[in-house]
């Protein structure tokens, strides 16, 4: 079976100040299988977010290729890549990225706006997704009226509503306190039980410890950490996490 | 759930932006920051209001001016006797008023008869007969004053019922010179007393009436039996026509006045007719130009605001790109938003401008005229200007890569 996502000797460089282009991500090859749960860990500035942008098709590798379901993403063209993100990839960001002036339901519906779903179905799905993250009673609340954890749950509902193949989350707990953060991870792991792959970028080792597969990245070099065999990812085992 | 999932998958071609979504998204964007929306739309609103108000005021002015010109005689022609080769007057035939009245362009016909010669008009019998006062006696047939458009300031005119009675109507100047201030007074004409039944307001379109004492045709003949035949001759026919080509009207009237083709004098107020045609254009052009300038300025304020909006909403742009919006969809979103801002502004402007134009007309006592066709045209122009103003900011938004945009917030 083809891997869901496959990076093949991909690099990412940005124009540097004087010494030529700056390679943020050195040649990296890795594959993400259907339904896999992965944590990407590393210090700030190590290239975590760059790697996530590449995997999420938000950015194209400078060299090398990214394949989605075996198809070269660079060859798809902007419109098909957009359609791919619209229907099969979910994102959850550290700063939530909700539209502050509209209600939770509207925010989740926006997540389906660029699909082919009719408006009525989008609404139904958005309500279902909000109920699933426990916000069924707060459909009409605007982000400023919600707590940080609730806002992040709205963002998760927005990603879940499209039933994605894979959910990418960039420091989803970064703006939350520890307890709320773990509740958010519970929610994400739970949601991934439906078959979606889950890729979480975090600098928090306790959170990383809850994922069976962990990638460590430092100075643009990605290293596969030993498999977290004692973990099934369904419940928190923080003792293991702390010792890791 | 599963079957809905399938419909969400890419179906070969990428989803195109739907109109309802576009409007919805633009609405959210435009109404999200109300104070700024109002301020940005205000530019367009004021532009459209200025245009609508100005063209409305211009139209009102014009209507008032045209009404005045017409009252003055832009459409008033005077038919009088012509002269033959030997400079002898050719009397107008008695049928002339009737044939003239039958012409389709003619609205009203008023007939004045020849006045008795050397009429002497005095306030009373004590005024020395040697004191001339330069007043003229004018003989009219019923309805003549209406055709001229003379307004009676006091009392009434001469009609079928009183034209054979010793009553007179005074022109404004004649009343002043005779010292008559109220109807009911009397004056002495050729040693006979005449009751004053009316005093005219000044008649700029026929100024000879101002210093005239006007009596009915039947009475003039009865009081001057020696000159009855002369009095029975038409001296002038005032013809009120519909506006039209002055030269054509003149020929038509000359022919109708004397079917034998003899000379007839037709005096049209040609200068006024020309003035009528020129006022049409200048005021309209002015309104148009001011409106266009105001719209451009309004468009620039929208463009300015949209550039700020795009910078501020980089995060939202990045999010939408991550959610699957194509650069084209982002561009359309911001162009639509700019056009929607303009549409609000345009609507407010049209209302404001129409209100101002009506208010001005009422205040100035002019007819409240609005060219209704210009209202939707002004609105459409505003929306177009808004859409144009949105293109540059929207293209900047569309050029942002998702990662750049997401970093921006």
Image (cartoon, helix red, strand yellow):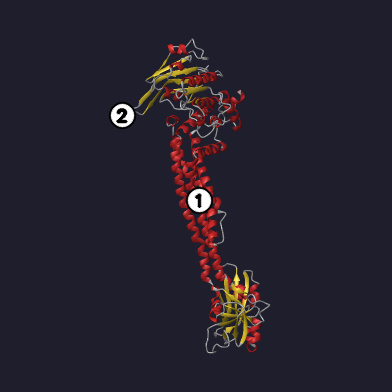
Check disc 2 and report the residue beneath it.
A18
Q: Is residue B128 above or below residue B378?
A: below
Report how many numbered discs are placed on residues in the image.
2
The percent position of residue B366, horizontal first and vertical second, equals 55, 62
**SS under mark 2:** loop
Q: Quick one: which residue is furthest to the right in this view?
A: B161
Q: CA distance from mark 2 to mark 1?
A: 53 Å
Count neighbours of disc 1 (C-alpha within 10 A) and say few if under 14, some if 14 to 19, many if 20 or more.
Answer: many
Q: Quadrant of residue B103?
A: bottom right
Q: Do the dots labelled 2 and 1 sit on one chain? A: no
Observer able to see residue B137: yes
Q: Which quarter shows the C terminus of chain A?
A: top left
Tell me the subunit letter for badge 2.
Answer: A
Check disc 1 and report the residue beneath it.
B48
Q: Is residue B84 above or below residue B351?
A: below
Q: Quick one: which residue is furthest to the top in this view?
A: A230
**SS under mark 1:** helix
Count neighbours of disc 2 (C-alpha within 10 A) and say few if under 14, some if 14 to 19, many if 20 or more.
Answer: few
Find out whether the residues at labels 2 and 1 contact each other: C-beta distance under 8 Å.
Answer: no
Query: Depth check: A70 or B378 in front?
Result: B378
Query: Depth check: B388 or A7 in front?
Result: B388
Question: In the image, what residue occupies the spot 54% across and 25% down?
Answer: A157
Label drawn at residue A28: none
Q: Is residue B351 above or below residue B59?
A: above
Observer able to see residue B211: no
Q: Is residue A171 left or right of residue B209?
A: left
Question: In the image, what residue occupies the spot 45% across and 43% down?
Answer: B303
Q: Quick one: which residue is furthest to the left in this view?
A: A18
The percent position of residue A194, horizontal first and vertical second, equals 56, 19
Query: Depth check: B252 or A161 in front?
Result: A161
């Amino acid at each position: 079976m083809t891997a869901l996502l496959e990076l093949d000797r991909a690099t990412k460089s940005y124009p540097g100040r004087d010494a030529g282009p700056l390679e943020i991500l050195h040649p990296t090859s890795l594959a993400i299988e259907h339904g896999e749960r992965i944590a990407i860990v590393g210090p700030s500035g190590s290239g975590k977010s760059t790697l996530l942008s590449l995997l999420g098709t938000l950015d194209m590798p400078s060299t090398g290729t990214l394949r989605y379901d075996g198809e070269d993403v660079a060859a798809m063209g902007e419109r098909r890549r957009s359609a791919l993100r619209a229907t099969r990839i979910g994102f959850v960001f550290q700063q939530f990225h909700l539209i502050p002036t509209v209600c939770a339901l509207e925010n989740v519906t926006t997540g389906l706006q660029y699909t082919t779903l009719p408006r009525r179905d989008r609404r139904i799905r958005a309500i279902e997704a909000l109920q699933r993250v426990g916000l069924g009673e707060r459909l009409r609340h605007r982000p400023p009226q919600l707590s940080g954890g609730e806002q992040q749950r709205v963002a998760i509902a927005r990603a879940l509503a499209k039933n994605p193949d894979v959910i990418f989350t960039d420091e989803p707990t970064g703006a939350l306190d520890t307890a709320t953060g773990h509740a958010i991870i519970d929610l994400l792991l739970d949601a991934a039980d439906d078959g979606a792959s889950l890729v979480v970028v975090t600098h928090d080792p306790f959170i990383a410890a809850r994922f069976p597969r962990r990638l460590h990245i430092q100075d643009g070099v990605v290293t596969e950490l030993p498999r977290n065999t004692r973990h099934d990812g369904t419940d928190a085992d923080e003792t293991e996490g702390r010792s890791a | 759930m599963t079957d809905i999932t399938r419909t969400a998958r890419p179906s070969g071609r990428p989803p195109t932006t739907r109109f309802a979504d576009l409007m919805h998204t633009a609405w959210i964007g435009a109404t999200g920051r109300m104070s700024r929306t109002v301020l940005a739309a205000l530019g367009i609103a004021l532009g459209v209001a200025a245009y609508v108000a100005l063209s409305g005021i211009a139209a009102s002015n014009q209507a008032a001016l045209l009404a005045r010109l017409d009252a003055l005689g832009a459409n008033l022609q005077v038919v009088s006797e012509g002269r033959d080769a030997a400079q002898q007057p050719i009397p107008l035939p008695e049928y002339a008023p009737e044939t003239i009245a039958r012409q389709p362009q003619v609205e009203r016909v008023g007939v004045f008869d020849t006045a008795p010669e050397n009429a002497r008009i005095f306030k009373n019998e004590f005024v020395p007969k040697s004191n001339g006062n330069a007043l003229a006696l004018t003989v009219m047939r019923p309805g003549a004053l209406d055709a001229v458009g003379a307004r009676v300031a006091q009392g009434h005119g001469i009609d079928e019922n009183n034209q054979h009675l010793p009553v007179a109507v005074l022109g404004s100047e004649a009343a002043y010179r005779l010292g008559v201030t109220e109807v009911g007074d009397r004056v002495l004409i050729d040693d006979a007393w005449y009751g004053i039944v009316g005093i005219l307001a000044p008649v700029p379109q026929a100024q000879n009436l101002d210093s005239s004492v006007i009596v009915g045709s039947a009475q003039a003949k009865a009081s001057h039996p020696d000159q009855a035949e002369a009095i029975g001759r038409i001296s002038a026919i005032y013809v009120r026509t519909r506006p039209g080509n002055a030269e054509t009207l003149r020929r038509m009237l000359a022919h109708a006045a004397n079917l034998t083709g003899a000379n007839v004098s037709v005096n049209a107020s040609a200068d006024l007719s020309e003035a009528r045609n020129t006022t049409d254009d200048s005021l309209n052009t002015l309104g148009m130009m001011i409106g266009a300038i105001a719209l451009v300025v309004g468009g620039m304020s929208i463009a300015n605001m949209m550039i700020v909006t795009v910078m501020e909403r980089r995060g939202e742009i990045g999010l939408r790109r991550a959610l699957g919006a194509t650069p084209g969809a982002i561009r359309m979103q911001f162009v639509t938003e700019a056009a929607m801002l303009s549409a609000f502004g345009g609507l407010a402007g049209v209302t404001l401008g129409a209100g101002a134009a009506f208010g001005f007309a009422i205040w100035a006592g002019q007819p409240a005229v609005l060219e209704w066709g210009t209202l939707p045209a002004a609105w459409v122009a505003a929306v177009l200007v808004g859409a144009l103003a949105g293109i540059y900011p929207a293209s900047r938004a569309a050029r942002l890569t998702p990662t750049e945009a997401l970093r921006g917030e």
